[in-house]
Image (cartoon, rainbow, N blue to C red):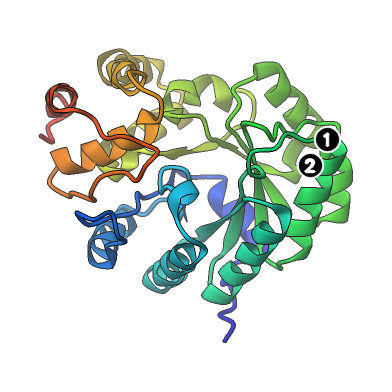
Amino acid sequence: MRHPSPYSPEELKVAIGDGLLSFPVTAFDDRLELDETRYARNFEIVLEHAPAGIFVAGGTGEFFSLTPQEVQLLVRRSAEMAGGRMPVIAPAGMGTRTACELAREAEQAGAAGILLFPPYLTESDPKGLAAHIEQVCAATRLGVIVYSRGNARVGAEILPALAERCPNLVGYKDGVGDIELMTRVYTTMGERLTYVGGLPTAETFALPYLEMGVTTYSSAIFNFLPEWAKAFYAAVRRRDHEHVYRELREFVMPYTSLRNRRRGYAVSIVKAGMRVVGRDAGGVRPPLTDLDEAEMEELRALIATRGRA
């Protein structure tokens, strides 16, 4: 049975463009099996803090380690819990046919949109990447946000034709951090797309990216410090440089230094933060690794400076 989305592609574009976005972690039990109860409990807390949109089973949600069945379950459960109050955006990725199937399943499950991850492993020519994006857009009536990162750097040279052929292509999420690339994309596409900051610990780049037309970003810190994350975003939007740079200096930069200790910690540190604030969502699945005890203590002390440890 198909659950129609409460958001048209254009409505999704508008909804996500003017508020902070969240991407909740995926909860696992001690055997690293999906823990639906803990996921639902944490998801309710995310809902209570009213982000502009929620990326389910995204990068921080360990999309890369989930089975298609787990993704579908999480999307369906999240859409039911959100009840149309805010858009639930589902992941699609891997090979083109798998991505198309995930997009169709997300539409059936009641998602409001699709975040299209890079194709698995292989690099591709822009023409092939454009074909990949177009086929996924054609597979669903939902709005699609393309995630430019890794082996899928989506440049301005392919976007105009894609936007013309794919009216449901409504968003561009940047995970590259190339200022010239982002400037070319925005200069070329203007308000045809909504632009989302998608670099690890996106708060670091929020203020300069705002000047390039990137009005929103997805915050991993929202998982364990939602009040802080929303206050920081509000300061970015009103261009309160004093607030932003104080928080960058005192909290975000030390946090990113800890995050950079090991590869994959951009996800692991978020789950560690959940444990610190008493909402344990389990560990991370391989190939990621969890923070060690000394690193946990560093994170606990850092979070305590913001009153939550």
Residue 44 percent location from the top left of the image: 28, 62
Q: Is residue 105 visible?
A: yes
> Would residue 142 appear left or right of 304 to someone viewing this image?
right
> Is 203 on the left or on the right of 252, as rendered?
right
In the image, is residue 219 above or below residue 240? below
Q: Where on the picture, by quarter, is residue 210?
A: top right
CB atoms of marks 2 and 1 within 8 Å: yes
- Residue name at image x 16 percent, y 21 percent: 298
Residue 155 location, quadrant: top right
In this rendering, the count of numbered labels is 2
Above or below, 257 relative to 137: above
**Amino acid marked by disc 2:** Leu
| Residue at x 57%, y 24% (from the top left corner) | 209
Give the distance between the C-alpha atoms of the residues marked 2 and 1, in whole angstroms: 5 Å
156, 132: nearer the viewer:
132
Name the quarter where the C terminus is drawn: top left
Q: Residues within 10 Å of mark 1 (few under 14, many from 20)?
A: some
Which circle marks residue 69 in the picture?
none
Is label 2 in a helix, a strand or a loop? Answer: helix
Residue 32, position in %: x, y?
Answer: 28, 54
Q: Callout 2 environment at 10 Å: few (<14), some (14 to 19), or many (20+)?
A: some
- Residue at (40%, 21%) from the top-left corner? 240
Looking at the rendered structure, the secondary structure element under dot 1 is: helix
The reply, left or right, for residue 149 in relation to residue 230 is right
Residue pointed to by mark 1: 126
In which quadrant will I find the N terminus?
A: bottom right
Residue 197: x and y in percent read 54, 33
Q: Residue at x 66, y 57 (%)?
A: 99
Q: Nearer the viewer, residue 52 or 166?
A: 166
Q: Amino acid at mark 1?
A: Pro
Q: Is residue 222 above or below residue 133?
A: above
State the residue position of label 2.
129
